[in-house]
Amino acid sequence: MSSAPPNNYSRLWHGKLSLTVLVLLALGLTVGIPAAGVIGAFVIAIVVSVIARKYGSFQDMGFRSPDSWPRLLGTTLVYGLIIQLAFTIIIEPGLERLTGDVVDISSFDGVRGNFVNFLLLMGLGWIVGGLLEELTFRGFIVGRVRWLLGSGRAATWVAVLVGAVPFGVAHLYQGLTGMIATGMIGFVLGAVYVRHGFNLWYAVFTHGFINTVGIITLYLDVDRVMNRWFF
């Protein structure tokens, strides 16, 4: 999983094949049913794990211990709060006005005021969203594209974009605007990954805290009010 360019044709084609498989699997999550996305996330994670064990290591994808866990948790909590609130209050409502399409999160309406569903979704938000999606879209896809294109600045941001696009498409069940907004969040998560030396834990915990804030606003049924604060 190293970001260094491949040194022989077999490694080059292995990289291209594994990247293609992952992108196709990510696109396959766009079936409009979140539960299918959960299953798909586990399938992708298994594929990634097999490839990582055979051709590299999880450490190559960024699963390294940070210098300070408290600093990581504090930093990612701030990131998660800022990102989720910015998208809920400003970016998603603004995109809705531009596209004329409302973000469809009706699949999660069962969480509103329901504590059991709140806990279940919170668990999925961390396991599937925080861990498995970051393992796939940042740790594997971003790392794999840099491995193929090189570790320069341009290649790095192309890799971040490549990871963000299927991440957004995988949320097409939220409608056009939801897909665009999620893709933008994916790009921001990629930037977090890059900013912190490709330590994947920063992206994992940032994603987890983004989901936490979003799920809390759903449970309290205040997200729709927040959407109208500026628009």
Image (spheres, helix red, strand yellow):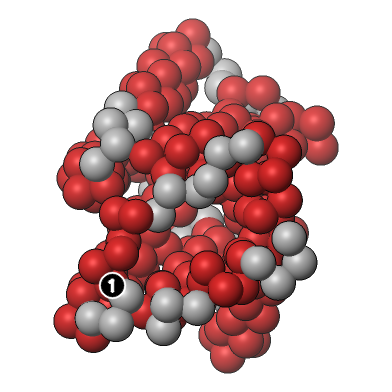
Q: Quadrant of residue 28?
A: top left
Position above or below: 129 against 25: below
Q: Quadrant of residue 22?
A: top left
Relative placement, left or right, of 35 versus 29 is: left
- Hey, what amino acid is under mark 1? Val
Relative placement, left or right, of 132 versus 144 is: left
Position above or below: 47 against 229: above
Relative placement, left or right, of 38 versus 153 is: left
Instruction: Write down the residue under mark 1.
Output: 111
Q: Is mark 1 on a helix, strand or loop?
A: helix
Q: In the image, residue 169 lies at what x, y percent?
A: 47, 33
Q: In the image, residue 171 lies at what x, y percent?
A: 42, 41
Relative placement, left or right, of 95 versus 167 is: right
Q: In the image, residue 4 lies at what x, y percent?
A: 63, 33
Can residue 162 be seen by looking at this rendering? yes
The front one of 196 and 44 is 44
**Other residues around mark 1 within 10 Å, as few (<14) / some (14–19) / many (≥20):** many
Residue lying at 41% horizontally and 19% vertically, measured from the top left: 20
Residue lying at 31% horizontally and 61% vertically, measured from the top left: 108
Residue lying at 65% horizontally and 67% vertically, measured from the top left: 228
The front one of 228 and 74 is 228
